[in-house]
Amino acid sequence: MSSTENAKYFNCNRRDFLKAAGIGAAAMAFPMGLLRNANAASNTDMSQKIVETDVLVIGGGIAGIFAALKAKDQGLDVTIADKGTVGRSGLSPWFGAYNYYDAASSGTKANWRVKKAHGGEYLTNMDYVGVFIEDSKARYKDMVAMGADKANPGGHVAVLREKVRERDIKFVERTMITELIKKDDRIAGAVGFPMEEEKAVVIKAKAVILCAGSGAFKTPGFPVSPLTHDGDAMAYRIGAEISGKEFIDFHWTHWENPAAVYDNWKGDLGHDLNVNTSPGGGLPPLSMAISAHNIQVPMFIKGLKPEKGKKLPPGLAVGQAPPGIRSVDLPVVGGATAGMAPHKSEGIFPQNAKFESNITGLFAAGDALCTEGAAYHGFGSSASSSAVQGARTGVYAAEYAKKSNQMSVSAKDIKTIKKRIFEPRTRKQGYSPEWVTQVLQGMMVPYYVLYVKKQDRLEAALANLSFLRDHFAPNLIANDTHELRLAHEVRNMLLNAEMKLRASLFRTESRGAHYREDFPARDDKNWLAWVVISQDGDTMKLKKRQVPDKWKPDARLSYNARYPNKFPGENKYRTGK
Amino acid sequence: MPVENIDKDKCIGCGTCVETCPMDVFRLDETSGQSKIVYPQDCQICHLCRIFCPEDAITISPVKYVRPMVGWG
């Protein structure tokens, strides 16, 4: 009906009808859609502080601490930056085991290499296995010399902060490094912002070492909420190659109070290091998390349950149950690290054995570097490997910085970067980072997306993710610097999600911590290769990089010898039985 | 709430929890000089604040509250 006819129907004149219907100049009466920024800043040209340094280490965990110490040993000006506080950040407080190669007790180097190749399902970077064999005992001795092997309620890395402070190393803490600066295809430094002041921190550096760890989707039950792949994201955006995004970590949490990180993992704090020199060998693929459709969910672990209405005494472990407290099976579920790969299975793709990315002057070490292969293969090796890698990278980055000039960073460069970084502060309306994070979690965390994969579900998630990327990421609001951090974290999580979905679609087989129920077997003919991701204009490009022949499994090894742990459906897929 | 309370009789305003928290939950209150819980929704219940607090002033619940999902936000 025309509006005149409508008006007659409602027994009012046409003008009144149009007003009521809200058509034309009248604005919508209901505040749906964009949230208003309650505290928008007036412009992005915040004040700035400039730091000049030779080697910038981004991330103050084990890898970053060792990198800073060893770079300083080379006599250079070293700066260490952290989104939180050095020695308190990321996963580093949470290790209890420490592994190293010892000629007397670990067996032969050749056997160690075989075990590591096997454990990573032949995607292990064997150059870095060699580095570990050479250096891991020396790094263990460093840990002991610094007192980091002793029980500490705040984790073994807690004491290392003081060691860094003793060394005249510059600290830039509680500052989220948000962009890397690249000039003429070489690294020039980085820019970030502190948690409590509206200002930019510009760090001009000759060499940059990314030690910002990995990341997840702020999942509950594992201490990964501060980790949002900031290193990968910044590096990707200046053209770095990233790899390992198809692999997913399987840490679990309790079904009851799933967000209680300390309750889950306090067993790793407060005791002397559990040292081992075993070559490991490989965990069953997705052991906890193949909650495939036909396997019982949840799994169970032994725990202590107090009598109804009573509280458990603090610090009590299974096996210490006093009278009246039963040891019971507590339900646990995977997903505490959805969005994360197993340690060192994802990250910057190393171009060589010297921790170099494909961006001149940009190095990476620790969980930020992709070296481990398709699965985690040795308890305690994540911590020790980070120490080994950080230390080596500090030396290589210092060598590079010694023979390099500082690339110039102009006032105009800084102004442009500040505009990008602070835009959510000035935006008057948009989407809140908390809500976008929640939407992302709903899309990506349930097991049937990244734990038990299938083409149609991956494509569905990618279609939704693309909408979030195109529509929400450029329209985030932040009403203070704390929320600005959340805004940049969710941008980085969105990028990681896209990498995880695309890499999972690309690798049409299953291997290690990547399980495709539509391709449930390993395909050595086509997939002894890494999936390498890089930016190509506005799009994300993926390519296969073959594993070198010398690292491929011995041709005499049967399939079952190579891959003793089978995925659900694998035998039937391969043999029809 | 996850991190629930800072005991006002115990807090000496040293700022250790503000620095230590990986999720930037705390701020030092300019008026009282003591720490306050400003962003509890971001707490990951890791207890590092409680562990490093020299005065044992912090109490923490294992329960996390999450905003209900709404259509826009």
Image: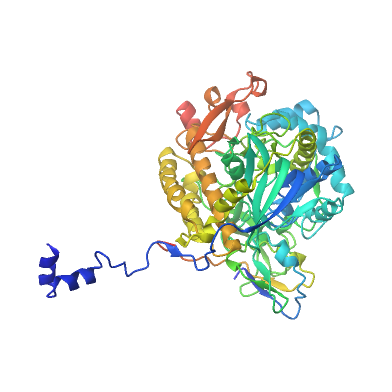
> What colour scheme has been applied to the protein in the rendered image?
rainbow
Across and down, in percent, residue B22 comes to 67, 59
Q: Nearer the viewer, residue A259 or A15?
A: A15
Across and down, in percent, residue A385 comes to 75, 40
Q: Nearer the viewer, residue B58 or A185?
A: A185
Query: Is residue A93 visible from the viewing direction of this image?
Result: yes
Is B14 located above or below residue A254 in the figure?
Answer: below
* Left or right, residue A395 beside residue A488: right
Which residue does the image show at 34% across and 69% down from the upper left?
A30
Q: Nearer the viewer, residue A412 or A101?
A: A412
* Left or right, residue A368 beside residue A455: right
Q: Nearer the viewer, residue A376 or A126?
A: A126
* Left or right, residue A449 beside residue A195: left
Across and down, in percent, residue A91 comes to 69, 51
Which residue does the image show at 49% across and 27% down from the upper left?
A574
Across and down, in percent, residue A265 comes to 68, 57
Q: Quadrant of the N terminus of chain A?
A: bottom left
Which residue does the image show at 46% across and 30% down from the upper left?
A573
- Residue A373 occupies quadrant: top right
